[in-house]
Image: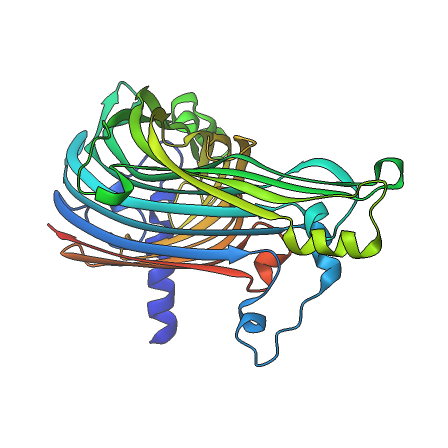
Amino acid sequence: MKKILFLLVICLILLPNVYGNDYEFPDEKRGFFPVKDRVFEIGLGLGANVSNNFLSIGEIFSEILVLDLDKLALGINADFGVKIPFNINLNFSTWGIGIFAGVDVTGGLGLNGNMLSFKTVNNAKSDFNAAVFAFGGVDSHFYIQQFKVKFRPAVFYPIVYVMPEKFSYTFNSPDGLTQLIVDYDITLYSAGPINNIANLNTSPGFDFSLGVEYPISEITGINRKIPILDFDIGLDLVNVPIIASIMNNYMRIDGGYRIKQEEDDELQDLLDKFGKGFSSETKEGTKRKSVDRAFKMFFWADWRPLYGNPLLSVMPVLGFALNDLYQQPFSMEAGIRTSANLGNMFVATAGINYEDRLFKNSLNLTFNCRALQLDFGAELQSPNFLASWTAKGFGANIGVKFGW
């Protein structure tokens, strides 16, 4: 009996292909008796992550913390983030529309390895940044001939925006004299005055996201000649700026650590300077600051190697991001995900990606009975690829969708 059931399941999976390449089943009849997409849907989610490239989670919580000073030469990078998305959607066969809103919190610290290991170097840069955005907009998709278009205009409101005007390190010995200089100039912009944050005076910004999907193998007939080459391709533009938000209030922290040896300094004079070299000044005021959200552009493909059956999909991604929070705004984005889809009832997706300047090894699970969908995800991550496999960072997300 078990063998008969197993053979029956296999037949159901491969049913779309037994009629040959001249016959195509609709998407809803492929694979296991699939759960239909919801026409009306409400969704809410929560995600959080934290990572670094220096200490694993086990090392941080161990009774004795052991620091490998040799690793300091590689620098320390740490990141954190929190996302809270919400959406309401109407989905039909050829078009859909909805609204979305949420809060996005990000932050990062990148300390130059030369500074941590006291190497001789001039003007080595480091990063320190954070941002809190609230956002909302309209989510829509529609078809233009064979192209599926996703268009998401949005309004965003920066609540906090922290970036370094300067964060540099210099250590050298000109003419045999010691010189150590650490300069930082960090500006915290806020939606209102620091001492009266409820008095908001930041203007909102506007941007949009655009995605285009094209079933190239079906349109060109490649999947009929070579059945395993069944794939779609797409291009996504995320947070294309239209109007920047203007922030007006700031708090500036300016200071550093300076030691300069004079020709007539004795050893005791130099030791005294080590203890008195720190200085810091805080200033509040108003000035205009234009703020945009990070822009991304990436190409992707959705390949279904089992003769077009959605039971298995492989999704490579390649693109880039521009984020003004960093001293080097440009970064690459790339990766690959593999997804197993059992009739839209259970979906498991595993991926290895480099995004948001982090290597992320992820596993996401979806349980869907149409009236209710639960999404769970977890990932190991780190700014360093090898560290991303040794629990030096982790992320988790959960989401719920319901409707009919």
- Taking the view exactly as shown, the residue that stands out farthest to the right is 176
State whether residue 201 is above or below residue 2: above
Q: Could you tell me which quadrant the N terminus lies in?
A: bottom left
Q: Quadrant of residue 140?
A: top left
Q: Quadrant of residue 390?
A: bottom right
Q: Look at the image and tell me whether residue 56 can be seen.
A: yes
- Report the number of discs: 0
**Percent coordinates x, y for residue 22 in the rendering:** 36, 31
Q: Residue at x 17, y 34 (%)?
A: 93
- Taking the view exactly as shown, the residue that stands out farthest to the front is 264
Its colouring scheme is rainbow
Residue situated in front as seen by the camera: 246 or 313:
246
**Percent coordinates x, y for residue 2 in the rendering:** 36, 75
Q: Is residue 98 left or right of residue 184?
A: left
- Taking the view exactly as shown, the residue that stands out farthest to the bottom is 63
**Percent coordinates x, y for residue 63 in the rendering:** 57, 81
Residue situated in front as seen by the camera: 135 or 201:
201
Q: Is residue 275 left or right of residue 348?
A: right
State whether residue 61 is above or below residue 173: below
State whether residue 50 is above or below residue 166: below
**Percent coordinates x, y for residue 290 in the rendering:** 35, 24
Q: Residue at x 34, y 49 (%)?
A: 15
Q: Is residue 366 left or right of residue 352?
A: left
Q: Residue at x 24, y 30 (%)?
A: 202
Residue situated in front as seen by the camera: 154 or 30:
154
Residue situated in front as seen by the camera: 353 or 347:
353
Q: Look at the image and tell me whether residue 355 can be seen.
A: no
